[in-house]
Image (cartoon, helix red, strand yellow):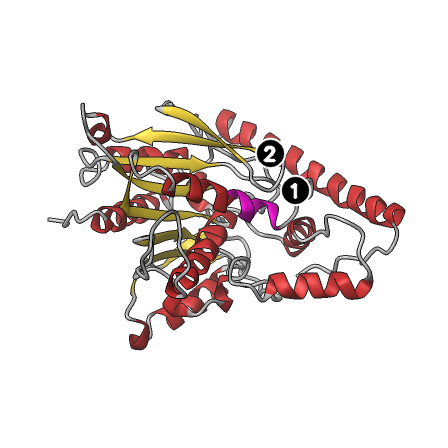
Amino acid sequence: MATIPSMTTPLAHFTTYYQVLLKVKIIRAFQQLGSLYARWVWKIPASDIRPFETIIVPSTKGDRRITVNAYRTKGAMAPNVGPVAVHLTWHGSGFVLNTFGESIPFVAHLLSHPLLENYPLVILDCDYAKAPEYPSPAPTDDVRDVIEYVFARPQEFDLQKVTVGGFSAGANMAMGIAATVGKEVKEGKPFGGLQTKEHPFKAVVAFYPPTEWDSRPDANPPPGVVVPGVRLDTSLVKTFDAAYFYPPKPLSVEEDAQRKERQLHTPLFTPRWANPVDFPKNMYLVTCEYDTLAEEAENLRVELKKPEYKKEVTGWNVKGVAHAWDTLVLPGQPGFEERQKAYDLAAEVIAKAGGIVHA
């Protein structure tokens, strides 16, 4: 991961912070321009679905307000429906980009899927704090707060039918919180008012997650070959990492090193460090052939599939695509059929978690 200078004085700390912030703001500006270009030139459509409601969850770790857009299936709109199943999803962002709402095509696909359309399900599309303004652990704190919000409301949500997932950074946090909570309940700690040693989440749906923070191999397509998706340049990833792990206050060299070491070896931040038994039984992982994050996630897949862990691990490495390809393809383009297949299989995982058997 990126080397982050350890600052021993407030002036040096904040000077370096603003250097990181400037880089992030430039990246954000290019990302926004890229989104506009995609809509105008590539005709990537804006979403035409609207949330059933927007929930504001107060942060328990600061003065932040966490925005959660709730989307209900037709089955969840029925009169007197009672508590409904819930799928929580977190978007990709590199932990720094303001891309809340980017997962709407996925949400729309789930809402219209034959297995889920009449299933009483609410999909919670969750925002979270972005670095470097809010470095780690602020984003994962927000993830935890939203999950605890759900589990504190059994009158609204069927807590026996909770699934979590996400894309890229969001997938990292979904996997991290799943392993963390799984370990806690196995140790007998209460979670959301539940006294059980069974995992509170029935499945994880993870698209191209970062699962480690070590140096990553290049995964570029052959020269002259254009593939759908985003190429994660090494310098870009280093900037993301530097922002995410930037110390929120001045630390000595030793303190900063210890802080980073603790986080990097904690499953909440690095799912690869989790004991596989702490994950839910059903794990759905999608990776991309030309994605620098693919190898680490595929290594985790191999580990999870070992018989002693008794996991049902599905998903695959999608050939001919790069990171986040699913957000950039249209019908008829290379990668679109793969997107539909990936979204369909995700719907099947969520349906299975709710006891719906695929015909």
Type of amino acid under label 2: Arg
Q: Between marks 2 and 1, how big is the CA–CA gap? A: 10 Å
Question: Could you say where residue 84 lies in the image, as x and y percent from the top left?
Answer: 25, 36
Question: Could you say where residue 170 lies in the image, as x and y percent from the top left?
Answer: 48, 47
**Residue at 68% of width from left, 48% of height from top?**
243
Q: Is residue 156 visible?
A: yes
Q: Earlier in the sequence, mark 2 or mark 1?
A: 2
Question: Could you say where residue 351 lies in the image, as x and y percent from the top left?
Answer: 22, 46
Name the main secondary structure of what is drawn in magenta.
helix
**Residue 336 figure quarter:** top left
Quadrant showing the N terminus: bottom right
Q: Which is more foreground, mark 2 or mark 1?
A: 2
Question: Could you say where residue 36 lies in the image, as x and y percent from the top left?
Answer: 55, 27
Circle 2 sits on which residue? 64
Q: Is residue 278 left or right of residue 135?
A: left
Q: Is residue 101 magenta?
A: no
Q: Residue furthest left?
A: 359
What is the magenta range? 137-142
Given contact means CB atoms under 8 Å apart, are the residues at marks 2 and 1 in contact? yes
Circle 1 sits on which residue? 134
Q: Residues within 10 Å of mark 2 (few under 14, many from 20)?
A: some
**Residue at 74% of width from left, 41% of height from top?**
21
Image height of 88 relative to 288, above or below: above
Image height of 264 relative to 31, above or below: below
Type of amino acid under label 1: Tyr
The residue nearer to you, when weighing 26 against 265, is: 265
Label 1 residue SS: loop
